[in-house]
Image (tube, grey):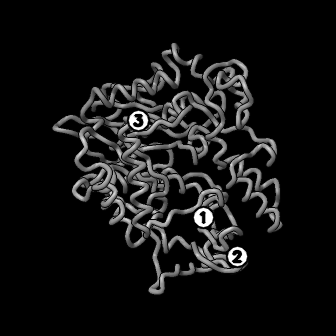
Amino acid sequence: MAGGDPGAEPTNWQSFFSGPAWEFDETSGEYYLHLFDRKQPDLNWENPEVRQAVYAMMRWWLDRGVDGFRMDVINMISKAVNPDGSLPDGPPLPGSALGDGTPHFFCGPRIHEFLQEMHREVFAGREGAFLTVGEMPGVTVEQARLFTDPARAEVDMVFQFEHVGLDQGATKWDVHPLRMRDLKASFGRWQAGLAEVGWNSLYWDNHDQPRAVSRFGDDSPECRRDSATCLATLLHLHRGTPYVYQGQEIGMANYPFASVDDFRDVESVNHFAAAMLAGEDASAVLTALRTMSRDNARTPVQWDGSPNAGFTTGTPWLPVNPDHGEWNAAAQREDPDSVFAHYRKLIALRHEEPVVALGDFTMLLPDHDDVYAFTRSLDGDTLLVVCNLSRTPYPLADLLPDAANGRLVLGNLGAGDPAVLRPWEARVLRP
């Protein structure tokens, strides 16, 4: 909290959801900070009573049997503070009267202290295994090594955002095609950076990201199943812990939003309003919203082909995707060739093959525009993973001579020419 008059915000920080990050409270006569929505006030972690209240809440949940915590934007809890106790302004944002506060709260000065204290107060001395995952926008590989080093007792994994920003320009609404070599460079850097210390989290989808099959794959009728299973194979064969977001395992796709009135996500709605005030083209803004809005991940899970996809007999928060008659869990559960069936095979492979869970990672073909290939190796055992993320077939022998004669451990397509990698085909091979 900070005192003051309306219109005299304590800092110039901009909220991630547009507008000032400060809200004036008439009752108290003070401002409160909200880095996101005004209904989400930031807690003051400098106050030890606040920290102890959070730790007590966490212990309460552990006592009830939860196995751990995913902690939202946890690397923003420590803010840089001026000698007089105030918060500093951020550098001006282009074309705005507001500033960028992230230099003062991304991995702030006491973040490691706070997380180590949390571990001591909440987890130390308890029986059982608990998983802690810190969502950390803007975190670097070097910072992640510190956060996830077991010897430091902070968190087990971090959710980093580097790879889900590769198809964006200055903002998430400035959308451009993903270059495969950029994805390889990013994933390869994280695989190498956390190879000896720490651990990777692996994800395509979550509640804040559009659907992977629409974003990184091809959700056309002829390619949707193949691209969904190809992307799944690529991710699950990396070193780290894979996360499957609701509906990803059945190939759920982005929703066909018709107008701005279809959106509920506050970030999307606020962005459209701000863009209209700035005189931007409404159709272009809507195109970006359809592509990147978080609402794409928040439509009801498609359990079956009934009204509202079996999700509810009432009115859901967002409408069900009209493709749910074909793309639903009930239709895929007994289909051995479905996206769901392939996810089950990938998960089983990680349990059956120690090399998948623990093997070293080596990137191959780093500059190829369409084919993503790498090896996993452990104690003399090697797997070669080759994924074609395009509609163009490629002769395997020209790319990787060892692949043409490899024994197939798992593939996402049926029988075909072993010498040709078909569109959206993924193969896991023993050379």
**In this orientation, which residue lies closer to the viewer: 121 or 179?**
121
Q: Earlier in the sequence, mark 1 or mark 2?
A: 1
Residue bearing the label numbered 2: 96
Between the residue at mark 1 and the residue at mark 2, the CA separation in whole angstroms equals 18 Å
Closer mark to the observer between disc 1 and disc 2: 1
Residue at image position (45%, 19%) is 415
Q: Quadrant of the N terminus?
A: bottom right
What residue does disc 3 label? 396
- Residue 349, how many percent across, how many down? 33, 27
Above/below status of 150 relative to 18: above
Location of residue 74 in the rendering, given as x and y in whole percent from the top left corner: 45, 58
Residue under the point 53% across and 42% down: 205
Q: Position of residue 91 (x, y in %)?
A: 58, 80
Local packing at callout 1 (Cα closer than 10 Å; few below 14, some 14-19, many 20+) is many
Residue furthest to the bottom: 84
User: Would residue 153 be seen by someone viewing this image from the given angle?
Assistant: yes
Relative to 121, is 166 on the left or the right?
right
Instruction: Answer whether residue 367 is visible to the viewer in this image.
Output: no
Disc 1 designates what residue?
34
Q: Residue 36 placed where, x, y %?
A: 61, 60
Residue 286 vertical placement versus 138 (above, below):
above
Task: State yes or no: discs 1 and 2 in contact (Cβ < 8 Å).
Answer: no
